[in-house]
Image (spheres, grey):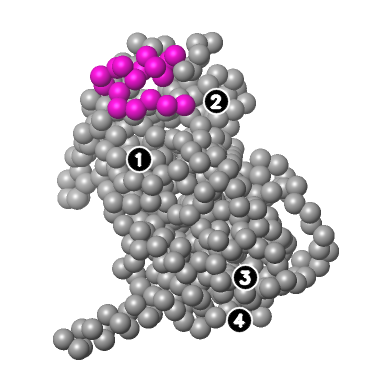
Amino acid sequence: MRLSALLLAATLSTLCVSPAARADTAAPATAPAAATEAHHPLIVVTFANVPRHPAGRAGTTGSHYGGSGYLVGQSAHQQAQRVARAYSLREVANWPIKALRVHCVVFEVPDDRPISKVISVLAKDPDITLAQPLQQFHTLTDSSADSRYNDPLYDLQTNLASLGIPRAHERSQGDGVRIALIDTGVDTSHPDLLGRIAGSRSFLDEMARSSDGNRHGTAMAGLIAATANNRVGIVGVAPRAQVEVLEACWQLRPNADDAACNTFTLARALAAAIDAEIPLINLSIAGPADPLLSALIEAGLKRGAIFIGAASADADSFPANVPGVIGVGSVEHVVGHPTVTAPSIHVLTLRPRAQYDFVSGTSAATAEVTGVVALLLASDPHLSAGAIEKLLKRTAGSGSQANPAEALSTANSVDASAALAQLEATRARRVAATTTH
């Protein structure tokens, strides 16, 4: 993988020329998965960025980057070059983050210096606003779970009854709610996703992308929004929602759900979701605490976005460690302190190439709760993340009544039907109070 990292550096060398020479650049650099496997460690460094706006050609309104006109400023570009020279670093990729108003650079440490010492030194540089390792994140699927079902449709979707979905669908099916799925790619041609995918963007390079690497994302998309009543396959939790696929993770092994992402690919996907004002963002991943990604989520929360993230046993695990993120755990095996829980064992969903199978893990539980939140947003688009969290907690615990044979821990188990019923009751009381006065 060392060779691919060097090839990446060569490919991106055009981004390191002067701002004047790059005035017509239409897209930022991408950081492929292969870069995270370089021989030397990679770090993420940000610089305060005063954006520049390139002069347009005569008779035009000017060129735009990503539709926003937000480009790398002269000072940020020069600071990055200075830092590379001063600290003997090699630039691998770079990208201006509009949401944080910074220029983000991935550097390779091309020698045997301890990465902790390099970051410690960089943190003291007055031109640098953040320095951290380029970290890796993993989807939370349980590959060791027992798959006893030969028939992929055996005992169809017991998770839906536990979540109260059949009754919830009488009130809401997620009509029109936009959901950002930050994951691997998705098989958008799957017959159970027709009409459900609003768009798809990739933040990986061509080496990392693969038509056979869409297992995890396809599974999560199916849990969230597989089409209902189409005489095909299964029913999604929010079967009328619109999923926007933001590919930031890559599959690690053939025919396995294991996938990984890194700070850079996740940052680009998160920023894209925030800039597009997508109200609901699914993160079926977990990994170490990450300052840059946390800052992006905090920026998104301030703009009203709602983040649903996989919770793990580690209380400081991203993204559930960020205040305001709804962390989802397993209802069958509660560990740590998740905000809410949902079914996570042998959950039926989609596979690429029009197939179906069972998945296990809190990745699945996270996607289910994202679907439930979409049902709530379709009923009341003005709900905040805090209001949704309180509503889910207040109505949790009754979903297992539809499945009494299951030995479920229901302390924080989401019940979509109860949540929607309480939402409607609250609205009715508010209307009644208004008319009375």
Label 1 and label 2: CA atoms lie apart by: 27 Å
Of badges 1 and 2, nearer the viewer stands 1
Q: Tell me which residue sits at (77%, 70%) in the image.
A: 154
Of badges 3 and 4, nearer the viewer stands 3
The residue that label 2 is drawn on is 5
The residue that label 1 is drawn on is 295
The residue that label 3 is drawn on is 400
Point out the tag, 3 or 4, that comes first from the N-terminus.
Answer: 4
Label 1 secondary element? helix
Of badges 4 and 2, nearer the viewer stands 4
**Which disc is residue 423 wearing?**
none
Specify whether 388 is left or right of 360: left
- Residue 379 position in % (x across, y down): 39, 75
Point out the tag, 4 or 2, that comes first from the N-terminus.
Answer: 2
Instruction: For residue 68, say whether it is visible.
Output: yes
Asked whether residue 404 is drawn in magenta, I would say: no
Point out the tag, 4 or 1, that comes first from the N-terminus.
Answer: 4
Callout 3 amino acid: Ser
Q: Residues within 10 Å of mark 4 (few under 14, many from 20)?
A: few
Callout 4 amino acid: Asn
